[in-house]
């Protein structure tokens, strides 16, 4: 399984500022902090912050970044994340998700935190997965 948009369009990076333009940017800001979505619907105050706090806690314990923990979470769920990066430094950061694994307890912590959010992530208007945040878009490939 290939997971694209593995950082939920930047929401799981731990950044407090996202750079998407237009309506997509406004929707991502609503997911980040709470607010009204451009297509209708409302994200409660605080948005994804409880999940970000859990990612940050795991990252701090592990000496990793939120992005590295989020990408490793996807790997632990059995998918191959395909993150995009515009800068070499960002790709080098993402490579830090390799060579280690979250414990089962850490995966369960993150899953419980994502499941506790009272909304689904519909960031780009495209949804290919039943996962709330992990591997937002997925494709299954088979080798015969």
Image: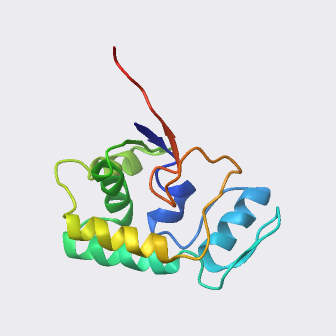
Viewer-proximal residue among 125 and 28: 125
Viewed as shown, does residue 70 lie left or right of 99? right
Q: How is the image coloured?
A: rainbow
Residue at left offset 71%, top offset 61% = 25
On the rendered image, what quadrant is the C terminus found in?
top left
**Vertical placement of residue 24 versus 1, above or below:** below
**Vertical placement of residue 95 versus 65, above or below:** above
**Vertical placement of residue 96 versus 116, above or below:** above
Viewed as shown, does residue 38 lie left or right of 92? right
Q: In this view, which residue lies farthest toward the bottom?
A: 45
Question: How many marks can you see?
Answer: 0
Viewer-proximal residue among 109 and 30: 109
Viewed as shown, does residue 51 lie left or right of 34? left
Quarter of the image where one finds residue 111: bottom left
Residue at left offset 28%, top offset 73% = 58
Q: Position of residue 11 (x, y in %)?
A: 53, 64
Q: Position of residue 65 (x, y in %)?
A: 33, 65
Viewer-proximal residue among 95 and 108: 108
Viewer-proximal residue among 20 and 120: 120
Q: Position of residue 102 (x, y in %)?
A: 22, 61
On the rendered image, what quadrant is the N terminus found in?
top left
């Amino acid at each position: 399984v290939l997971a694209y948009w593995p950082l939920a369009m930047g929401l799981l990076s731990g950044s407090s500022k996202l750079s998407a333009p237009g309506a997509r940017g406004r929707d991502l800001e609503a997911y980040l902090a709470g607010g009204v979505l451009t297509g209708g619907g409302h994200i409660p105050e605080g948005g994804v912050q409880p999940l970000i706090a859990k990612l940050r806690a795991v990252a701090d314990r592990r000496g990793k970044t939120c992005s590295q923990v989020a990408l490793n979470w996807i790997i632990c769920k059995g998918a191959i994340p395909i993150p995009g990066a515009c800068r070499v430094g960002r790709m080098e950061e993402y490579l830090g998700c390799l060579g280690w694994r979250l414990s089962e307890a850490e995966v369960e912590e993150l899953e419980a935190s994502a499941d506790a959010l009272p909304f689904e992530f519909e960031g780009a208007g495209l949804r290919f997965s039943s996962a709330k945040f992990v591997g937002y878009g997925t494709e299954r490939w088979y080798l015969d």
